[in-house]
Amino acid sequence: MSDTLRNRYTDAPTLTGNLLTGSVRLLFWLFFHPSAWRNHLKRIDGTLSPYFSLADLKRGQWTNTAVLRFLLMTFFAWPLLVGLLLGLLLWLLNLPPTALLLGVMLGIAVGLIVGLAASIAGSVAIGVTVGMATGFALGLGGALLLRAAGDLVLNGAPIALEIAISSLIGATSGLAGGLAYGVGVGVTREEMVQEAASVSVLRQVSGMVVGILIGLAAGFLARLLEGGWVTVLLSAIPFGVAVGWRSQSWRRGLVAGVLVGTAVWLAGGVPSATAVGGLVQALAFVAFVAALFALPYVLAEKIAGTWAGGLAGALGSGAGLFLFATDGASYGPFLSFGLAGILLGLTLAWWRPVLLYPFLLIWNRILYQLDVQRADDAAKRPLLRWHSAFWDEFQRLPLLNLDAHLLLTIHKNLAEGRTAMAYLTGTRQRWAAQSAQIELDARQLELCETAVQIAEVHPGLAAGDLVGPASALLRSFSRLSTDVAAALQQESAYNQRLALHAVEDRLDGLLRELTRSNEPYAARFRPIAANWRHIIGEKGARLAEEAELRQEIDSPYIIGVPLTEKQAIFIGRQD
């Protein structure tokens, strides 16, 4: 099997292509095929955990070109995707070009800064999701607010600015937290089994609650004690403590805190969300948000795991930002939009497979029809490798017609089909591999046209001790094949005829059972049993004719059929 074939059907594919295509594929892995993301990271540096942060990197890793290329590719594609989606959505909303451009720029800038900050103090994988959600939500909200001279007007109804900001903060924090939780669960799936036994639900909830309270306290203090130095300290101290705690190096934490505090101080403190400021003040505002994210994340991660840390960081920063940015605004919009965002993110693994299912069926059907049209062209490789079963790790619904596509690929390219089947046996689409293997066994049984072929077919039937109607049927056919082989080993035609007659009787019984059965595979295997009975019956009739022509005399000293080593009841002596 070639390296190319192994790379098509695996959870550890190699990342090829240039910077752009490789970055897009890496981002795709993070959301759809996290095991490939984990294995790629393990191939680059086996010492890095799937939830590593930039603060965890050692000096040797910062000089490793493979690690640097991985980081560059991680942060290259998703800002472009956020900008593209923002631009398309704002264009559909008929926003003026100035508001559209500023919204896209704001979304990309805010997303990058928040994502980098979350990657430094939290996790690189979590930083990508938090950056994408924050950039998209704030870019959209910023463009809508920039278009409005005063209060925001939607469908002719004016909306107070503070209520709009409250709703935007709630939606952003909730969606970012939910997505961070979902991606964190996928990336750290291998560690979840070990952590689940030691992390109780109470610890997970308490970790998130403590993180949210820290964000609330920081936001309340920043609002209560408005001033340059207060906001500088409230930005520098949480971020520095988070980095130092996460990296187990307080020197790094001190450097990170000083850098963030200096940036906020040079900007003149953190401005209010409703204030009009320049780019520098906007960056200071984003730095404050990142600081509010960092400490709740690290604290909740230490208590309850990475996925809880991502949720606590997003909710903590959102709650703190809400208290800081809104002066006495209603809690209703913040809580309602925040809850909606959380539910969307937390239930991503539930509703995304259902939402994408019809589109995946159409995509997979197109691939199957193309392979059917190219079935006779051996020069063209099968398109099964692009089937969603091999790249959508979270699709739990059975992908219809996958077994037929698998059989078509096996017929055209046996090695590739067997490789794909081996991969599917370890996924949620295992049913397709089972169905295809049962059909292959049925076709193997159908090809038997003589008693000799029936006797030789049992080594290829690997039913084993598996349970299920198909396995029971395959074991029955395997025993019948073994009995036919034992019958043909008899020396006299008379003994062969007696043994084959017993096999024919068992085939009659199997046919009656299949006729009465409602099992799903009964209709498939009944014609095979009928054909076998016909073949064995003809073989017995020919043996009877041969015995009559030879005028064989039955031995009165042998009762029944002599046992041979081919029969299951035979037990040889050991002396």
Image: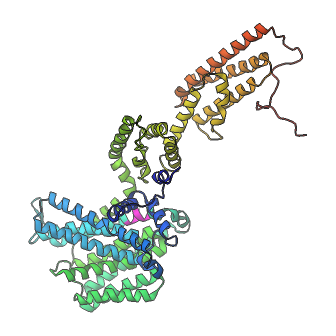
Residue 8 against residue 448 in the figure, above or below = below
Of the pair 301 and 451, the residue shown nearer to us = 451
Is any part of residue 333 visible from this angle? no
Q: Position of residue 531 (x, y in %)?
A: 59, 20
Residue closest to the eye, 551 or 429: 551
- Count of marks, rendered view: 0
Which residue lies at the image location 23% right of the left edge and 78% below the top edge? 325
Q: Quadrant of residue 75?
A: bottom left
Counting from the top left corner in percent of width and height, residue 87 is at 19, 62
Is residue 256 visible in this depiction of the protein? Answer: yes
The furthest residue to the front: 379
Q: How is the image coloured?
A: rainbow
Residue 357: x percent and y percent? 36, 46
* Residue range of the region highlighted in magenta in the rendering: 180-185
Q: Main secondary structure of the magenta part?
A: helix
Residue 226 lies left or right of residue 507; in this view the side is left
Residue 376 screen position, x and y as percent: 41, 34
Taking depth in this image into account, of 336 and 507 the one nearest to the observer is: 507
- In the figure, 63 relative to 563: above or below? below
Given the current orientation, which residue lies at the most extreme bottom position? 229
Q: Is residue 476 left or right of residue 182?
A: right
List the single residue furthest toward the right: 575
Residue 177 in the image: above or below residue 267: above
Residue 361 position by quadrant = top left
As for residue 33 lying within the magenta part, the answer is no
Q: Is residue 460 above or below residue 480?
A: below
On the rendered image, what quadrant is the C terminus found in?
top right
Kindly indicate the quadrant of the structure image that contains residue 271.
bottom left
* Lateral position of residue 186 relative to residue 567, left or right: left
Residue 390 horizontal side relative to residue 434, left or right: left
